[in-house]
């Protein structure tokens, strides 16, 4: 069946997945028999567009670059009306993340699932705040709720535990969950101060103008919460996770670690111990011989402690336009192959 | 549907998966709704047993330990007759690997697939020699042919590329594909000779009495062949892969590498370059800062070079009774969830 794809949000991720779907059409059809149209886009800045026979993706990408309103296929349908009453079979929820309220994303996801549409998302809000409820709603409506993009989008994590590691009981997940701070710590080891490094990270686009989400550990905390709730059924809230960022790490701290043969890493972890779930985000000095110590730059790395395999570690890139776009694509393929 | 499982071979792997299925029954039912009986076992040493309502697994494991013939549920059915005409829904092919002819495993797999039974295997023979043919036969009969256990059984590889990395084009796979030789090279760095280390590896059960398959690189070559044919549709034969083992590496070679800040690793690789497939197995000196350099002991590590994510690396244990048993379990779960 040809999938009819809808995008909620046409920012960096929305354009990333649109570029991928534009450029890999033949490959995806040949390798996976995956055929699709993007038929709807809802975006605060650009308005809502809808064409049940497929939008003009190359034109949309051009128009988005010009930051002008779409003029073709504009619709008067309100967003939730579009979510419910269009011919979209799978919605990609790619609007901004609000980790406190879940933002409009929660309404988008609930409405889509209730209407029997699959949802694929990179938005941490609904996943971190309401995963069990959303999963139940999806099951009741016979559709999928896929969230690979919410945790370390460039590094397969959720689908790894759900698929290739299926059957293993996972007692601990720990690692480098935020590429931006790992890049900053890597650069600080070369002798720069926190402020100098932050400026470069912002220039490179790794850190936002307001870097709080990364440097205070909030982004990593959201990921720990999602992992705890999804992989370990922890039922915790974001505020349950003790969280410390890297803002207090000084060049002296870096030197202190170096002299002991160690290296600072911002480590997020979730562990099942004595029947309880323990979580944390905090900078840790790890020995240079530790597998995570060699993970440098804007890279993610997660180690899963399992009952049957001992430790299994995956290392991959941090989030970016194409990396997060990929996480959406891989979940779209899952929906295609399993529905 | 309750799966009716049959085991071809009741050696180390057959007992490993039997122990797992015995011990995780409640967990697998609760988490995945996976219900099963082992109804048939065919083994050269112990004879063929069959009970359509389920064999007594704990008793079977006890009897196997005593190396006596099974006395309960013995059947006169020949193996291929059992494969075809029992109520088994999924066969696990776990007999010995013959990389030259494929051994009896090829007849087992062909017969099972033709009879509309799923096949899960850790046997490199059918996968390395005839994967495309077996996959086609499975498709024609509406069943699965699953082979996670054939490549680095304790480290998810095949299912990683097929699932969480789906959508990525992989241009190169390289890494440490043989845990035994990696253990030996790690120990040689501590100052022991090749012969001393081999003896210890044999005592620990890492190396066979005849260690040729590991130390000459043949095991890694089989894995490279399977990866080339499955991930890159290379259509190559085992003998197409240039192969050099670790038997000629001396303490002097180890010192020479050390002095340059390098370390020997037996690297298997397959690469798509200029429209051609290039494969090799050979010892290489890698820089100590290289991600693979830190992979010590009986561990596997593979790096996938991809179009959308750059490099993604997975690190996990080498094959063992439970690790290979796990690879069978995870494929059984895949069959259960997708059929």
Image (tube, coloured by chain):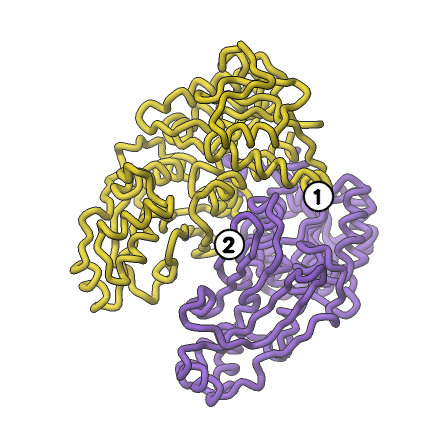
Chain colours: A purple, B yellow
In the rendered view, would you say B45 is above or below A52? above
Give A331 or B330, whichever is nearer the viewer.
Answer: B330
Q: Residue at x 44, y 56 (%)?
A: B310
Q: Which mark is residue B99?
A: none
Please indicate, yes or no, whether residue A315 appears anywhere in the rendered image: yes
Circle 2 sits on which residue? Answer: A312
Counting from the top left corner in percent of width and height, residue A22 is at 55, 48
The outermost residue toward the bottom is A252
Q: Residue at x 57, y 37 (%)?
A: B19
Circle 1 sits on which residue? Answer: B31
The outermost residue toward the left is B252
Instruction: Give the left or right position of residue B254, taking residue B118 as reference.
Output: left
Which chain contains the residue that carries disc 1?
B
Q: Residue at x 55, y 31 (%)?
A: B61
Give B74 or A258, whichever is nearer the viewer.
Answer: B74
Counting from the top left corner in percent of width and height, residue A7 is at 68, 53
Query: What is the CA distance from the residue labelled 2 to the residue labelled 1?
Result: 21 Å
In the rendered view, would you say B322 is above or below A179? above
Q: Residue at x 42, y 81 (%)?
A: A260
Could you say whether the residue bearing mark 1 is in a helix, strand or loop?
Answer: helix
Instruction: Give the left or right position of residue B159, taking residue B319 as reference.
Output: right
| Disc 1 crowd, CA 10 A, few/some/many (<14, 14-19, 20+) | few
Could you say whether the residue bearing mark 2 is in a helix, strand or loop?
Answer: strand
């Amino acid at each position: 069946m040809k999938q009819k794809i809808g995008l909620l949000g046409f920012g960096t991720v929305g354009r990333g997945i649109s570029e991928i779907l534009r450029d890999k059409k033949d490959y995806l059809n040949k390798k996976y028999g995956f055929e699709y149209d993007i038929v709807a886009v809802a975006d605060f800045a650009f308005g809502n567009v809808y064409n049940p026979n497929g939008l003009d993706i190359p034109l949309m990408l051009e128009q988005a670059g010009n930051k002008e309103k779409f003029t073709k296929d504009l619709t008067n349908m309100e967003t939730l009306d579009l979510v419910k009453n269009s011919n979209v079979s799978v919605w990609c929820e790619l609007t901004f993340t609000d980790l406190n309220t879940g933002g409009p994303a929660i309404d988008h996801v609930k409405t889509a699932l209730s209407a029997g549409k699959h949802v694929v998302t990179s938005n941490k809000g609904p996943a971190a705040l309401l995963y069990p409820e959303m999963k139940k709603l999806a099951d009741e409506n016979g559709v999928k709720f896929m969230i690979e993009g919410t945790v370390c989008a460039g590094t397969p994590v959720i689908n790894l535990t759900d698929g290739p590691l299926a059957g293993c009981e996972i007692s601990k997940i720990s690692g480098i969950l935020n590429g931006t701070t790992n890049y900053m710590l890597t650069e600080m080891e070369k002798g720069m101060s926190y402020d100098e490094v932050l400026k470069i990270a912002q220039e490179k686009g790794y850190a936002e103008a307001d870097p709080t989400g990364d440097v205070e550990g909030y982004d990593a905390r959201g990921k720990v919460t999602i992992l705890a709730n999804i992989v370990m059924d922890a039922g915790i809230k974001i505020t349950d996770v003790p969280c410390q960022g890297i803002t207090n790490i000084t060049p002296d701290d870096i030197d202190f670690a170096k002299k002991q043969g160690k290296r600072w890493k911002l480590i997020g972890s979730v562990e099942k111990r004595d029947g309880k779930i323990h979580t944390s985000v905090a900078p840790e000095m790890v020995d240079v011989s530790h597998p995570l110590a060699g993970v440098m730059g804007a890279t993610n790395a997660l180690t899963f402690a399992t009952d049957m395999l001992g430790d299994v570690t995956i290392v991959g890139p941090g989030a970016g336009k194409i990396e997060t776009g990929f996480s959406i694509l891989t979940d779209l393929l899952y929906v295609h192959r399993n529905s």
